[in-house]
Image (cartoon, helix red, strand yellow):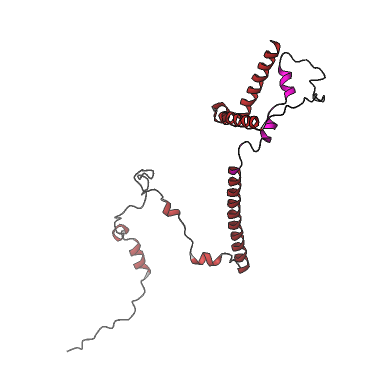
């Protein structure tokens, strides 16, 4: 009885011969490749990217924040600059407080001064008598009507104290009525100008008659 020989198996497979390579190449490659389950071409051709239902870019997408690292990386303010900034702010506060007090004091002074006290703006705004007379139809350019000519001084009549007080009361009452008038409140200078013109016309008519 013969011996049974056990076949030896090599650890590494033997190299495929050229004939085997040609046989593998001649095989049907369609059987080796798996079928394509998902399409890889023309994925975005049918989709509409301009649809209104798509979410738009919100403000949060563009919003940025300042981190501690960015603050540390910025320019540091020195102690001298901080002291200077605090001093400038303190000066601004002092200036605002002093200006407010000054305005309050000026308003209080103006409230205490009567209306008749300062009449210089009104005197400067009113026209001179020679200019008003030049507007009238009966103006004659005599030497007595020119500015350079000095009118003759008339003797002043002396009034008693009672008459002076009575006149002052009448003038103050008349002045209060003028202040309350609607035309004077609207345009005081124009109202006084018209009043003077009318007064001069009345005096001229009285002299002619």
Residue 122, by quadrant, is top right
Task: Report the residue that reaches farthest toward the top.
Answer: 209
Magenta stretch in the rendered image: 112-136
Residue 147 drawn above or below residue 140: below
Residue nearer the viewer, 157 or 181? 157
Residue 113 drawn above or below residue 126: below
Residue nearer the viewer, 122 or 51? 122
Check residue 188 for magenta coloring: no
Image location (x, y in percent) of residue 48: 36, 44
Quarter of the C terminus within the rendering: top right
Residue 53, by quadrant, is top left
Residue nearer the viewer, 154 or 182? 154
At 71% from the left edge and 18% from the top edge, which residue is drawn? Answer: 135
Image location (x, y in percent) of residue 121: 67, 35
Residue 52, by quadrant, is top left
Image location (x, y in percent) of residue 123: 69, 32
Residue nearer the viewer, 137 or 97? 137
Image location (x, y in percent) of residue 182: 54, 27
At 59% from the left edge and 54% from the top edge, which residue is drawn? Answer: 96
At 67% from the left edge and 14% from the top edge, which residue is drawn? Answer: 206
Quarter of the N terminus within the rendering: bottom left
Residue 82 drawn above or below residue 111: below
């Amino acid at each position: 009885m013969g011996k049974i020989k056990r076949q030896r198996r090599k650890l590494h497979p033997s190299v495929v011969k050229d004939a085997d390579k040609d046989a593998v190449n001649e095989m049907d490659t369609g059987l080796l490749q798996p079928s394509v389950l998902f399409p890889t071409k023309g994925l975005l051709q049918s989709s509409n990217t301009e649809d209104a239902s798509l979410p738009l870019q919100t403000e949060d997408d563009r919003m940025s924040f300042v981190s501690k690292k960015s603050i540390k990386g910025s320019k540091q303010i020195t102690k001298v600059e901080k002291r200077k900034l605090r001093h400038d702010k303190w000066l601004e506060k002092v200036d605002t407080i002093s200006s407010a007090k000054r305005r309050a004091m000026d308003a209080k002074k103006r409230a205490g001064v009567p209306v008749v006290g300062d009449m210089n703006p009104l005197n400067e705004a009113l026209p001179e008598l020679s200019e008003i007379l030049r507007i009238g139809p009966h103006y004659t350019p005599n030497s007595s009507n020119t500015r350079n000519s000095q009118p003759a001084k008339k003797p002043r009549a002396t009034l008693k104290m009672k008459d002076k007080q009575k006149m002052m009361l009448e003038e103050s009452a008349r002045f209060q009525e003028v202040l309350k008038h609607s035309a004077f409140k609207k345009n005081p200078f124009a109202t006084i100008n018209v009043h003077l013109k009318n007064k001069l016309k009345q005096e001229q008519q009285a002299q002619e008659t």
